[in-house]
Amino acid sequence: DTEVTQTPKHLVMGMTNKKSLKCEQHMGHRAMYWYKQKAKKPPELMFVYSYEKLSINESVPSRFSPECPNSSLLNLHLHALQPEDSALYLCASSPGRGTDTQYFGPGTRLTVL
Amino acid sequence: KQEVTQIPAALSVPEGENLVLNCSFTDSAIYNLQWFRQDPGKGLTSLLLIQSSQREQTSGRLNASLDKSSGRSTLYIAASQPGDSATYLCAVITGGGNKLTFGTGTQLKVEL
């Protein structure tokens, strides 16, 4: 298995909802990432987990809460989001060293009403 | 702070043409540089990775070069095809690693 999977593909939520995005990989990678991408912009790093520990938080608002339950799974919990949080959320993984190739999932298209 | 710029922002070429996409970065202390392809509304596909000690990498019709001292990389696409139409992003890793800084992207359209 050489891919990163993300669910759901699309998500529409209200500003008072709580939802979660899920990312999974079975390549034995030990680093996992969340990126946010707005239309016609490059991806922006949100969080990095290395060996299941949060190693980078790019000053992301607390309404985004990451979780790494095990080395194969990465979640992003969403609560009290704003319409400007609507974007494509991309997950990626890499073998573990900081200089490795990152493999990206297809993304979750999030719309906040 | 590392800044990555890509020129041109958009490019339209006829099928069969050879083309060059450019990427420049402000901090030459990089670990590596990656080129990605992104189709509309989709995730990123890694095309080539060049380590800081390398000068170029090739994969099929793609060739990427790196000049670290001048802060530049180019992606050469030979004999372009309509299926090459996508946005191409370069990204670099600097500092403590793990953190990719992406360029602004080049939107390529190859016409029949």
Image (spheres, grey):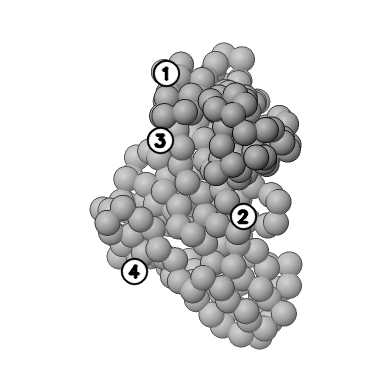
Residue A75, disc: none
3D distance between C-alphas at marks 3 and 1: 14 Å
Image position, residue A38 (x, y; %): 68, 57
Q: Are marks 2 and 4 in contact (CB under 8 Å)?
A: no
- Name the residue nearer the viewer: A54 or A96: A96
Q: Which residue is mark 1?
A: B54
Quick one: SS at disc 3? loop
Give, as a three-letter code, the residue at label 4.
Answer: Pro
Task: Answer with the quarter of the image where residue A100 lies.
Answer: top left
Give, as a three-letter code, the residue at label 2.
Answer: Pro
Whether residue B64 sits left or right of residue A59 in the image: it is left
Quick one: SS at disc 1? loop
Image mark 4: chain = A
Q: Residue at x 51, y 70 (%)?
A: A9
Q: Are marks 3 and 1 in contact (CB under 8 Å)?
A: no
Q: Is residue B11 visible?
A: yes
Q: Which residue is mark 2?
A: B40
3D distance between C-alphas at marks 1 and 2: 31 Å
3D distance between C-alphas at marks 3 and 4: 24 Å
3D distance between C-alphas at marks 2 and 4: 31 Å
Q: Residue at x 47, y 46 (%)?
A: B45
Q: Judge if badges 4 and 1 mark residues of a common chain.
A: no
Image mark 2: chain = B
Image mark 1: chain = B
Image position, residue B60 (x, y; %): 41, 29
Indicate which disc, 1 or 2, sits on the residue closer to the N terminus.
Answer: 2
Whether residue B45 sits left or right of residue B11 in the image: it is left
Residue neighbourhood size for the residue with mark 1, other residues' Cα within 10 Å, grouped as few (<14), some (14–19), many (≥20): few
Residue B96 position (above or below residue B74): below
Q: Which residue is mark 3?
A: A99
Task: Answer with the quarter of the image where residue B56 lies.
Answer: top left
Q: Which residue is mark 4?
A: A69
